[in-house]
Image: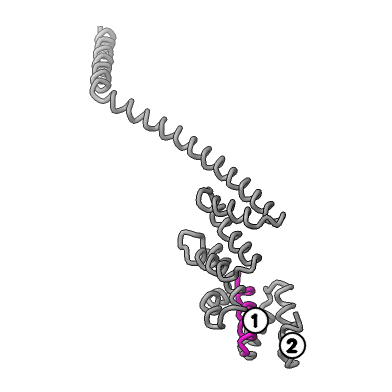
Amino acid sequence: MANQNDSFIREVNEELRSDQVRAAWLRFGGVIIAIALLIVVGTIGKVAYDYWRDSSASASGDAFLAALTLAKQSRTDEAIADLKTLEANGHGSYPVLARMRVATLQAQKGDTAAAIAAFKAVADDQSVEAPMRDAAKLRAAYLMIDTGSYPQVAAEVEPLAVAGNPMRHSAREVLGLSAYKAGDKEKAKSWFQAIANDAESPRNVANRAQMLLDVIASGGDAGAAG
């Protein structure tokens, strides 16, 4: 008898749970389905976006390489036009690379002022990653050695010339060259000596610095040493 009672109670409990599930489904089933659909749609959207981003970046890479090929063929104006299109419509890091390359081609054409302005625009663009902005500062500063004053060059790259900065070697070199051109041989010597004293200076930069230190010590002209 007890077993029959237990069986009856279990059946009643199961029926009650079934009724509760049906009631909950009737009440919340639409919400559950909507949430499930949102998850599925979101997943599909993420996969589609990743595919679009990767394919777009790949297309931008192809366009960038095509522009570099034009530049190598001395079709500079065509290369600049294509790079500016990539700058406006490209994806990934290619728009910034296009801006940098346009500035380089402008410098090669002899339009130094435009090249400096282009590099400085990249350097001042906070949406660009810091290493690329620092590289643009250096490129602008190298061009400014012949066209700008030492204070102008220092304003661009002196913050990069500190210990620990990975671009300090090039920054010190450009500062030394600018100081030498300005006639301040003591300041130039201090920058070149900083390169020579830095055990992490690249060999080619250190060799140039030592050569220029020797020129300064002999009282000669750095132009002749180059």
Q: Which mark, by number, is residue 215?
A: 2
Q: Quadrant of residue 193?
A: bottom right
Q: Is residue 60 left or right of residue 34?
A: right
Q: Is residue 131 above or below residue 83?
A: below
Under circle 1, the secondary element is helix
Q: Nearer the viewer, residue 81 or 39?
A: 81
Magenta stretch encompasses residue 110: no
Amino acid at the residue labelled 1 = Leu
Which residue in the protein does label 1 denote? 177
The structure residue drawn at horizontal position 55% and vertical position 50%, both measured from the top left corner, is 86
User: How far across and down, in percent of the image, does residue 209 sit?
Assistant: 70, 80
Overall secondary structure of the magenta stretch?
helix
Q: Nearer the viewer, residue 215 or 37?
A: 215
Mark 2 residue crowding within 10 angstroms, few (<14) / some (14–19) / many (20+): some
Give the extent of the magenta segment. 167-183
Question: What's under tag 2, amino acid-wise?
Answer: Val
